[in-house]
Amino acid sequence: MSAVAAAALMTGATAADAACDDGEIVIKFSHVTNTDRHPKGIAATLLMERVNEEMNGKACMEVFPNSTLYNDDQVLEAMLQGDVQMAAPSLSKFEQFTKQFRIFDLPFMFKDINAVDAFQASETGQAMKESMVRRGLLGLAFWHNGMKQMSANVPLESPADANGLKFRVQNSEVLKAQMAALGGSPQPMAFSEVYGALQTGVVDGQENTWSNIFGKKFFEVQDGITETNHGIIDYLVVTNVDWWEGLDADVRDQLGAILAEVTEMRNGESTKVNEEAKQAVIDAGGVVRSLTAEQRNEWVEVMKPVWDQFRDDVGQENIDAAQAINA
Ligand code: LMR
C-alpha cells in the first residue's frame, strides 16, 4: 500500500480512495451496508486494515461499502467477470446459484445466531461453502449479522396486522413465500432502494436486523419495529474460484489465515453489535414493540408452514440437524 493510501486510512477516508502500489494484487471487496455499528461493515474494514498492513507489498484491499460499487444483485456477476474479487452477500442472495442456502431463510429455523454458527460449523455447513464451485464461486467464510425483525407503517402485533401489506424482501423464494403466508405482498428489491421505497410508500414494510434497520435508518420511515426474531441474516464471504486458485500459495494461505482470524473475532461480537444498534434505534426515537410468548407463537403458527414448500430443496436431514442444535 502506498503512503497516500496509508494516510487515507488514518484520516478515515474511504478505502475506495486508497491507491494500491504497482505490483500489489488488488482485492476489491464490495458490500452494501454501512461500515460502523454493523457486523459486516466492521468485519470488512478490519479485514482490509489487516491485509493492507500484513500483506503490504504483496496485496492491497479496497473496500467499497454502501453499494457504492455494486448492489447485491450485480456483485456476483461482476465477480464472475473478474471486476471484483470479494463480497459478502447475505445467504438469501445466492438464489440463482444454489438452493442449499434456503434453509437459512426458513422462518423460525434457528433460535439464535449461536445455533446458526453451530450448524455452519458442522460437516454439512462447511460443505455448503463449496456448493457453487462449479458455477465459479467459492465461499471462504460465513459472517454473521443477526436475527430479523419486522417493521411496517402500521403497528404489527398479531400476524393479521401484516395482511394486505406490501413487504420488501430480498430476492429469495423462501422470503416471498413467508410474506405470502402472512397475507402480505412480497416485493423483491435491492437493499439500497429500501429506504426510498418505505418513504414513498412503494412498500409498507420490511424485515431486517437491528444493525440494518439502524444503519439505513428504516425506523425513521416506519411506524415501528416489532421484535419477532423470526429469521436470520447471515453472509457468505465469497470469491471467484479461478482468481483464488490463481493466487500464489503463500499469498492465498496468508489471506485465508487473516480472513479466518477476522471471522472468528467479529462473529463473536455480532450479537452485541446488533444489541447496540437496537439501543441506538430507541435512542433516536424509533418505536420498538416486544411480543409476549403467546403473541410470538401466533407468528410461528402462521409462518412455519412455509417449511413444507421447501423441504425437498433443503433436505429433511438438514432441518432435523438444525432443530437438534436449537434444542
Ligand atoms: C438486505 O438486502 O436486506 C441485506 O441482505 C443487506 C445486508 O447485506 O445485510
Image (cartoon, rainbow, N blue to C red):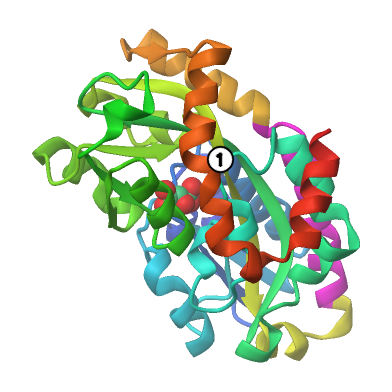
Q: Nearer the viewer, residue 246 or 181?
A: 181
Q: Residues within 10 Å of mark 1 (few under 14, many from 20)?
A: many
Secondary structure at numbered mark 1 = strand
Q: Is residue 98 above or below residue 136?
A: above
Residue 131 horizontal/vertical position (percent): 71, 77
Image quarter of residue 201: top left
Residue 232 horizontal/vertical position (percent): 58, 42
Q: Residue at x 79, y 36 (%)?
A: 326
Q: Is residue 83 above or below residue 16?
A: below
Q: Residue at x 68, y 50 (%)?
A: 143
Image quarter of residue 23: bottom right
Residue 141 horizontal/vertical position (percent): 74, 60
Q: Nearer the viewer, residue 105 or 60?
A: 105
Q: Residue at x 48, y 16 (%)?
A: 295
- In the image, the segment drawn in magenta is 251-270
Pointer 1 residue: 231
The answer to whether any part of residue 62 appears in the image is no
Q: Quadrant of the N terminus?
A: bottom right
